[in-house]
Image (cartoon, rainbow, N blue to C red):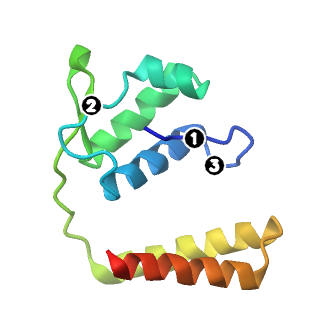
């Protein structure tokens, strides 16, 4: 499993773990039935407190991505997409994209490179 975090980021570590694992789930690099590393092992690998990993695992269980079974650990499960209102999702997407674009611009990412990378991401989505 390839999961990295940036301790210098303004994004909380537990959120980085959630986001990183969610990408692995969506891209099927972690598929239903796969076991996740034990909380303490992943915490050691990432250099964070085990409670941070446990918090991320609990959040992913609440989202329906994983099942936590005590000593058996956490396992990826088949997730049914929630029935969400499309206008609400679109508004959330626009807000989050706006925040991401502002953050990247503030960190020196050029508008032309950002546009190129967004086009590349959109093309990748259309191919899948």
Secondary structure type for disc 2: loop
Where is residue 84 drawn, in percent x and y? 25, 71
Res. 88 in view: no
- The quadrant the C terminus occupies is bottom left
Where is residue 11 drawn, in percent x and y? 63, 48
- The quadrant the N terminus occupies is top left
Which residue lies at the image location 59% right of the left edge and 25% below the top edge?
Answer: 48
Foreground disc of the pair 2, 3: 2
Q: Which residue is mark 1?
A: 4
Q: Which residue is mark 2?
A: 35
Secondary structure type for disc 3: loop
Task: Give the residue furthest to the front.
Answer: 127
- Left or right, 101 with reference to 127: right
Which residue lies at the image location 54% right of the left edge and 45% below the top edge?
Answer: 16
The residue carrying pointer 2 sits among few (fewer than 14), some (14 to 19) or many (20 or more) residues within 10 Å by Cα, namely some
Q: Of callouts 1 and 3, which one flags the residue occurring earlier in the amino acid sequence?
A: 1
Calculate the distance from the C-alpha at mark 1 to the C-alpha at mark 3: 13 Å
Residue 95, above or below 35: below
- Left or right, 100 with reference to 106: left
Where is residue 117 drawn, in percent x and y? 61, 77
Residue 120, above or below 73: below
Task: Find residue 70 and report its image quarter.
Answer: top left
Q: How many marks?
A: 3
Which residue lies at the image location 35% right of the left edge and 79% below the top edge?
Answer: 127
Q: Which residue is mark 3?
A: 11
Which residue lies at the image location 31% right of the left edge and 45% below the top edge?
Answer: 30
Calculate the distance from the C-alpha at mark 2 to the C-alpha at mark 3: 26 Å
């Amino acid at each position: 499993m390839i999961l990295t975090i940036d301790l210098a980021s303004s994004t909380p570590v537990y959120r980085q773990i959630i986001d990183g694992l969610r990408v692995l789930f969506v891209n099927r690099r972690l598929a239903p039935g796969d076991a996740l590393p034990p909380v303490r092992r992943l915490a050691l690998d990432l250099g964070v407190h085990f409670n941070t990993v446990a918090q991320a695992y609990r959040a992913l269980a609440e989202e329906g991505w994983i099942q936590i079974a005590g000593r058996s650990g956490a396992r990826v499960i088949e997730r049914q997409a929630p029935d969400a209102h499309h206008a609400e999702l679109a508004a959330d997407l626009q807000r989050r994209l706006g925040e991401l674009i502002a953050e990247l611009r503030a960190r020196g990412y050029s508008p032309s490179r950002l546009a190129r990378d967004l086009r590349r991401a959109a093309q990748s989505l259309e191919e899948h």
